[in-house]
Image (spheres, helix red, strand yellow):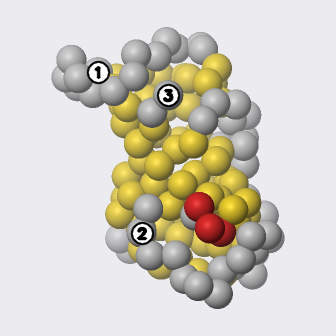
């Protein structure tokens, strides 16, 4: 569950939404009509993935990678077969190459170029 903090509407079709899970802030694109202050739950899609590998850091983290100008995430794999990673309270589906040696329960780190969300 996360809370909508801000919505920008660059077009009638797109919404750029900033949310918080109480610890981490994340921004994604959506076509859904959402309201500031409302709470939503669901899986956030992560696209344009780089540098996905097992992490020695066994904690959640969201930051920014200055080298490639992408979001940096560290989280725990909750379903390796579906490429689902938990970062804080966010469930994130990783779209892209998912190395075969990564198993459910492992911590991974990776860079994300773009997030989408659909209700």
Residue located 49% across and 12% down the image: 35
Residue located 46% across and 16% down the image: 34
User: Which residue sits furthest left?
Assistant: 11
Q: Secondary structure at mark 1?
A: loop
Q: CA distance from mark 1 to mark 3?
A: 17 Å
Residue located 35% across and 63% down the image: 48
Regarding residue 66, the answer to whether it shows in the image is: no
Above or below 79: residue 45 = above
The crowding category of the residue bearing disc 2, from other C-alpha atoms within 10 Å (few below 14, some 14 to 19, many at least 20), is few
| Foreground tag (1 vs 2) | 2
Q: Which residue is mark 2?
A: 96
Above or below 105: residue 117 = above
Residue 119 disc label: 3
Q: Earlier in the sequence, mark 2 or mark 3?
A: 2
Q: CA distance from mark 2 to mark 3?
A: 21 Å
Q: Secondary structure at mark 3?
A: loop
Q: Earlier in the sequence, mark 1 or mark 3?
A: 1
| Residues at discs 1 and 3 in contact (Cβ within 8 Å) | no
Residue 9 disc label: 1
Residue located 74% across and 70% down the image: 104
Q: CA distance from mark 1 to mark 2?
A: 28 Å
In this view, the residue in front, 35 or 62, is 35
């Amino acid at each position: 569950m996360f809370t909508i903090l801000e919505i920008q509407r660059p077009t009638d079709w797109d919404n750029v939404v900033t949310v918080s899970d109480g610890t981490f802030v994340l921004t994604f694109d959506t076509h859904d009509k959402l309201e500031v202050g409302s709470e939503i739950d669901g899986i956030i899609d992560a696209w344009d993935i780089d540098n996905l590998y097992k992490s020695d850091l066994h904690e959640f983290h969201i930051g920014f990678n200055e080298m490639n100008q992408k979001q940096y995430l560290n989280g725990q794999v909750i379903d390796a077969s579906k490429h689902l990673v938990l970062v804080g309270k966010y469930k994130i589906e990783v779209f892209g190459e998912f190395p075969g040696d990564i198993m459910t329960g492992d911590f991974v780190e990776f860079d994300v170029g773009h997030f989408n969300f659909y209700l």
